[in-house]
Image (spheres, rainbow, N blue to C red):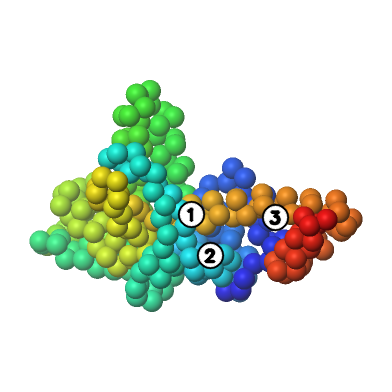
Amino acid sequence: MRSLSALELLNIWEWGHNQPSCSKAIRLLTTACSELPVDILNKLSIGQRDAMLLTLRERTFGSQLASQTTCPNCGELLELNFNVADVRMASPQLEAVEKFSLSVAEYEVSFRLPNTLDIMAIAEGASEAIAQSAVPEATATDKQSETAQQILLERCILAATDKSESFSFNQLPSNIIKAVIAEMAQVDPQANVPLDTSCPACSHEWQLLFDIMSFFWSEINAWAFRILRDVHTLATTYGWCEADILAMSPRRRQLYLDMVLKR
């Protein structure tokens, strides 16, 4: 994996307008990891993909992360400051395509881990299910979540047997389904990263799920607007073209900006 240039990052940001999160994730990785075919990246588990995105984010913006959240108990606005190491989970080295087995009661279940193609299928299937049903918004959200889980498990559960009798996903008891979901999370922990959070104002404690793609893209979005303002300033002052300004190192670009501001 290599670092992205300012021009590459800006081009990805422009392309990513209104693109789904999973598509933006793969575009970032295919640019930074040009030696890996896109079909390989698409088949990486979500945890593997997110681990690569976390590394890319660290190389792009550094190891420190800063965010904000609101206390669900009292509404206090909280500043969150943490390090990449705090959200990097110790995951086993998995192949792009890997089959896992789980024994629960008398059931033997084989499954694979969810990947980006599964997330794309979920987005498409869940949207279609909601579009075809006229239900209240709250009910629609529940239905969308239920449909997403069904699509995911139908795709990822490869086989299920009980005393040599085969079962489809829809025939499995709920406790078996829950066990498979728990095992997926155990095997691929980077896919679901909890952040322990507490409110200094009311002492309420809760967990947030850290989504590297959403976090990284919000930073890219803020960076893009800043860099475009910088390009505008330098182009207006010196007559330089965008490509030349973006090709400068951040330090040199900032030195020129400082001189402009001091004029």
Amino acid marked by disc 1: Phe
Q: Nearer the viewer, residue 95 or 71?
A: 71
Which residue has dot 3 on it? Answer: 227
Which residue has dot 2 on it? Answer: 57
Which residue occupies the extreme bottom position in the image?
93
Please give the name of the residue rendered at 60% of the width and 50% of the height, measured from the top-left corner.
221
Residue 218 coordinates in the image, percent (x, y)? 54, 51
205 vs 188: above or below: above
Residue 152 coordinates in the image, percent (x, y)? 35, 51
Amino acid marked by disc 3: Ile
Q: Mark 2: which secondary structure?
A: helix
Residue 98 visible, this angle: no
Cβ atoms under marks 2 and 1 closer than 8 Å: yes
Distance from disc 2 to disc 1, alpha carbons, whole Å, reads 9 Å
Q: Which of 184 and 112 is in front in this view?
A: 184
Amino acid marked by disc 2: Arg
N-term mark: 2 or 3? 2
